[in-house]
Amino acid sequence: MEYEMKKVALGTLTADIGPKEDNPRNSEGTFLQLADGEILFVYSRFRGDSSADQAFADLSLMRSRDGGRTWGEDKVILTFEGENGVNMMCPALLMMQNGDVGLFYLVRLTYARTQIFLRRSSDGGRTWGERVVCTPQEDFFVMNNDRVVRLESGRIIVPVASHRSGEGYMDGRSVAMFFYSDDDGATWNWPVDKCALPYSSYCYSGLQEPGVLELAPGIVWGWARTDLGRQFEMFSVDGGERWTACQPSRFTSPNSPLSMKRDSNGTIYAIWNPIPNYDGRFEKWEPVTGGRFPMAIAASRDNGKTFTPPRAFEWDESRGYCYCAMYFTEDALLLAYCAGDKADGNCLTRTRIRRIEKAQLAEI
């Protein structure tokens, strides 16, 4: 995909959650709108003095009663101590079939073991029920925020990356797996297939941080980040049980995540960090940003066959932009993404919420 990256001012920032004393990182959020119109935003709120992935972290919730234009005070809803872990992060909200709010999240139980859990709330996220294990085996799983998807059939898919690990080590080369539930999250099934890079010995990433999108009933498009300059993609025609071999996709990127969702009109929007014309941007890579700039958006109005040229809406090279949550309301697209800079410590420590009117999205 060769193009000249164009910049466009999209929407307005409605929240900017930066680090502060005893709160060194705020990252990886997810949205859900309730039946009464109130919007929930849940994110990973770190505490202590470290912003590392394995540091102490809880889940916090904010509410908006005006369509995401303003946000109330945040409130911690689940703590890592309450989960018998050392860390919890990467939430994903999903409306359950009986109207409950479903909250999926990752708990780091030990250095070498993580699990994905589901809790439900029947009172709009004010209290939470008992947790259910979504990954019924012992492993080191990584699930991105805002990745859990319900298919047209009702099946729920939880995409994860599986890393071989043990006490004191973890293989960075992961395989993609897709756990699923056909009873609204009560019980969970192991995936039939795992997806792996056929030449993973030549890279350090494997298939990391997978995501999924349903193209047609039972036909699922999956993707994962790599350190090979592109997102890799795979497909399933049986609702996510069996998958094709992975292949390079059209989406160039550093080793950073791609997010895609469909609006009510059927348009698919993709948000990621393209590599414009392979212009040597990797030379600008540094630990603060991870090369994760600019952040761009593109649209497909033919079910993923083609996409419009990407438009950069965040382009400050001193910041890194990543882990974007996407949520469509009746009249807007809400985004929440990491946007930290060197003064913040690294790109993961600050989260921005942006609201884009649908009328403006139509121009992409």
Image (cartoon, rainbow, N blue to C red):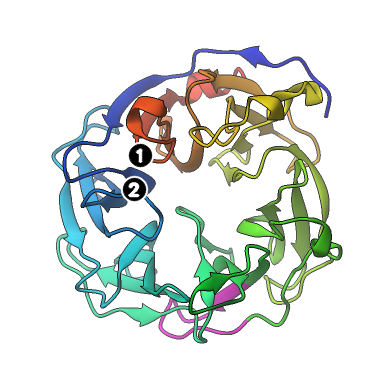
Residue 179 lies, in percent from the top left, at 57, 75
Residue 144 lies, in percent from the top left, at 50, 56
Q: Using residue 79 as the reference point, say whether residue 149 is left or right of it.
A: right
**The residue tagged with tag 2: helix, strand or loop?**
loop
Residue at the spot 20% in from the left edge and 70% down from the top edge = 128
- Return the mark for residue 349: 1
Residue 186 lies, in percent from the top left, at 40, 83
Q: Using residue 63 as the reference point, say whether residue 92 is left or right of it.
A: right
Residue 112 lies, in percent from the top left, at 48, 76
The C terminus: image quadrant: top right
Q: Which residues are magenta?
A: 178-190
Q: Within the magenta stretch, is there residue 185?
A: yes
| Residue type at numbered disc 2 | Ser
Q: Using residue 200 as the reference point, say whether residue 27 is left or right of it.
A: left
| Residue type at numbered disc 1 | Thr
In-front residue for pair 48/244: 48
